[in-house]
DNA sequence: AACACGGGGGA
DNA sequence: TCCCCAGTGTT
């Protein structure tokens, strides 16, 4: 069977299914394409259009933008978000006035050097405005390529991104760069979407490795959410003859600062020894429990609750600010952390009676 | 609530 | 060089 050429498929699809009437496609000057590409960073087409037209009306060319105050630029940008883009846009306009005689540069490295313009945006501007041959690799194209070539690994990783740039270069045709560049972005935005991609309407389906191996939903590989560290602790449910439970006040800062909590010990330590050392208690461990996980924003805490009965609580004097014995019906009125409340609630049911 | 996003800037 | 951020829309 004949080799499928990505650009051929995409260009043929673009003819009937791509967008051809976007404002920045009408008069493809470098200035207009540049403005569009900056606005389109992290912002969808439908949102951009009214801003784009308003902006162009006020700043129809590069010099009007360069001469404007940053305040005026930001005012027109208001509502689009990511205002760093507007600052860089204005800064770049000034740079172009000073260093390029007011003409938007046509050399790739010069464009790349402007503030707010990276490799992909530089390529997109020159390809769309001048038909120069440059690969682009925005989020849409990354998704298309990751799926088409079944590229594993998070695209933000350098090695993966390097491979993606290589594929992007290899796929880029030598002609019709204006259409191809727009077509790839349109394909990613309307067909090869992050979720619910429309593979049945995709011009690349026949050659798509992810589609062939049913991995469309898994690719691109998502960013590994940084694995939270796991800490472990043992919480002691120490009850006396009356069923009252021992609570400790936590330090004012840190986790559960100032709340009442169950005494905690290192899960690897011997419970009887610790109870004797810390409180002078001879204790009887009733049971050990499988425990459960409580997750904070920055770590998991695996909690093992251990049920303990002590016969001599009255004999032991404690600092009432730090330790209380709390009767079973009384715990609800105390400021408890959620896991501690859960544990106490769970064990209150089976609280031993004297 | 988690995730995605292009480029800048700091480690 | 690599990582993380800012700031907002989408899922």
Image (cartoon, coloured by chain):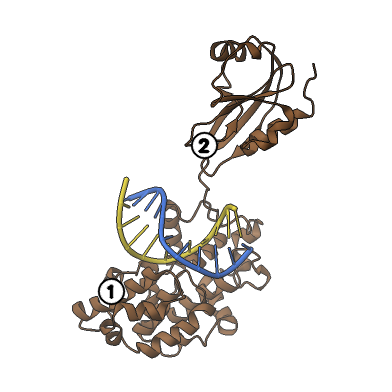
Chain colours: A brown, B yellow, C blue
Residues flagged by tags 1 and 2 on a common chain? yes
Chain of the residue on which disc 1 is drawn: A
The answer to whether residue A295 is left or right of residue A88 is right
* Between marks 1 and 2 in the image, the one whose residue lies nearer the viewer: 2
Residue A13 in the image: x percent, y percent? 58, 79
| Label at residue A257 | 2
Where is mark 1, residue-wise?
A91
Residue depicted at 50% across the width and 45% down the height: A226
The answer to whether residue A301 is left or right of residue A171 is right
Label 1 vs 2, first from the N-terminus: 1
Dot 2 falls on a residue whose secondary structure is loop
Residue depicted at 23% across the width and 76% down the height: A95
| Label at residue A1 | none
Report the quarter where the C terminus of chain A lies. Answer: top right
Residue A171 in the image: x percent, y percent? 47, 68
Dot 1 falls on a residue whose secondary structure is helix
Report the quarter where the N terminus of chain A lies. Answer: bottom right
């Amino acid at each position: 069977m004949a080799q499928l050429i990505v650009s051929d498929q995409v260009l043929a699809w673009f003819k009937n299914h791509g967008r051809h009437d976007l404002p920045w496609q009408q008069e493809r000057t470098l200035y207009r394409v540049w403005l569009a590409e900056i606005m389109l960073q992290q912002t969808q087409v439908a949102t951009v259009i009214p801003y784009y037209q308003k902006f162009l009306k006020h700043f129809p060319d590069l010099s009007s933008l360069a001469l404007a105050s940053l305040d005026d630029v930001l005012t027109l940008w208001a509502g689009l978000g990511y205002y760093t883009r507007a600052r860089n846009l204005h800064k770049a306009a000034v740079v172009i006035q000073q260093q390029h005689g007011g003409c938007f540069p046509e050399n790739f490295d010069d464009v790349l050097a402007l503030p707010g313009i990276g490799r992909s945006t530089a390529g997109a501007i020159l390809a769309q405005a001048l038909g120069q041959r440059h690969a682009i690799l925005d989020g849409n194209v990354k998704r298309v390529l990751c799926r088409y070539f079944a590229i594993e690994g998070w695209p933000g990783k350098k090695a993966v991104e390097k491979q993606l740039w290589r594929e992007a270069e290899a796929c880029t045709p030598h002609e019709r760069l204006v259409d191809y560049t727009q077509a790839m972005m349109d394909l990613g935005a309307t067909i090869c979407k992050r979720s619910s991609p429309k593979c049945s309407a995709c011009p690349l389906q026949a050659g798509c490795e992810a589609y062939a191996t049913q991995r469309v939903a898994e690719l691109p590989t998502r960013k590994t959410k940084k694995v939270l560290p796991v800490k472990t602790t043992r919480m002691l449910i120490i009850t006396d003859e009356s069923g009252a439970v021992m609570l400790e006040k936590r330090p004012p800062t840190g986790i559960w600062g100032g709340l009442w909590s169950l005494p905690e010990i290192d899960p690897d330590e011997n419970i009887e020894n610790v109870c004797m050392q810390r409180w002078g208690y001879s204790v009887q461990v009733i049971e050990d429990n499988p425990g459960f996980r409580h997750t904070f924003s920055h770590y998991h805490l695996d909690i093992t609750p251990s049920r303990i009965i002590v016969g001599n609580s009255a004999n032991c004097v404690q600092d009432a600010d730090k330790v209380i014995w709390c009767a079973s019906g009384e715990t609800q009125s105390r400021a408890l952390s959620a896991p501690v409340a859960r544990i106490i609630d769970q064990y209150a049911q089976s609280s031993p009676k004297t």
